[in-house]
Amino acid sequence: MATTYLDPAEVLAAQKTLRTRLLDHRSAISWPAGRELAARLLLHIDEPMACWQLAVEWMCGAFDVERVDGGYATPAQRTYTLGSAEARCADLEIDSLRGIAIDNHDPGVAWIWSSSRPVVFAEIPQAKRMSRGLRQRLMAAGTASKIAVALRESGKPFALLCIDHMEKRRDWTAEQFACFQSLSAEVLGPILWTAERLQADASAHAHTGDIEDLTPAELRVAMLAATGMSYKEIARSLSRSFSTVDHQLRSIRRKLGVQSCARLARLLAIRSGTAWHREYSR
């Protein structure tokens, strides 16, 4: 099975680009609280679902709502599975939406996909844009009202995000709508799209991680790194330059699909048997 490897250099470059775009200019994010979330999400940009979960949990408290859910999807999909990432108010007994598949071409869902702004469903029982079946499924899960949006980057939708009230008498305020729109367009859109792109690019170049793919020189460097030696110590031991060792370890990580020396050590211990012991002991 192929192993997904994210090049640390690419992750750092993406973080730097987004930090410049979102945080270096005060006007880039119109809701000041959104800057806090952006800064936290950038630390996890190499883990798309960790980004999602952090975002929905933060939003549940920031918007004072009972449930937040979202996930990657496209308008072309036949179904959309709710709750890929989900947060629920801890003080209430609220049903989870995880795993519920809905018709992605339902008129109500299609409206969300087509709208460039968040869509408000003030009362789910009266939401005529939705099919009767979708209304019933949401009401069965306790949803009384909802604001939903299609997250976009460069104008293209790539995910859905919803915040829910479970109490019928709680109305959405203009401030909530404005903050939700700011967060979805200015923070979550660019960050979650970049996180997905990094993962997709890594998957496209995923490698099977065969030790046989290493050159003899790389194998010796890999084994030294797996013992916990630093780059400088490896360079000194093999009479090579620091830059040569750095280049070889980048190649090793890429070939084996690992991101740390600890994972490299585990991979070698599991997969190599005694072959590398013979090579390394020569």
Image: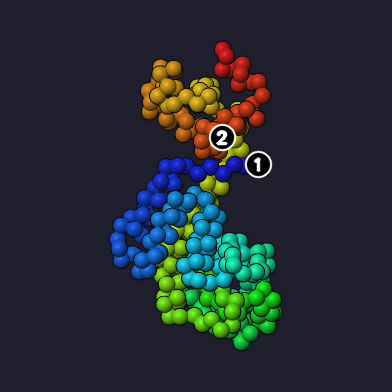
Picture quarter containing residue 137?
bottom right
Q: Is residue 100 above or below residue 118?
A: above
The crowd level at tag 1 (other Cα within 10 Å; few <14, some 14-19, many 20+) is few
The alpha-carbon separation of the residues under discs 1 and 2 comes to: 16 Å
Marking on residue 1: 1
Q: Are marks 1 and 2 in contact (CB under 8 Å)?
A: no
Question: Which residue appears at 51% of the width and 32% of the height?
Answer: 261
The earlier-in-sequence mark between 1 and 2 is 1
Residue 154 in view: no
Residue 273 location, x and y as percent? 66, 24
| Residue corresponding to mark 2 | 263
Q: Please, what is the three-letter code of the amino acid marked with disc 2?
A: Arg
Q: Please identify the quadrant where the N terminus is shown.
A: top right
Q: Is residue 145 above or below residue 261?
A: below
Q: Please, what is the three-letter code of the amino acid marked with disc 1?
A: Met
Query: What element does badge 1 sit on?
Result: loop
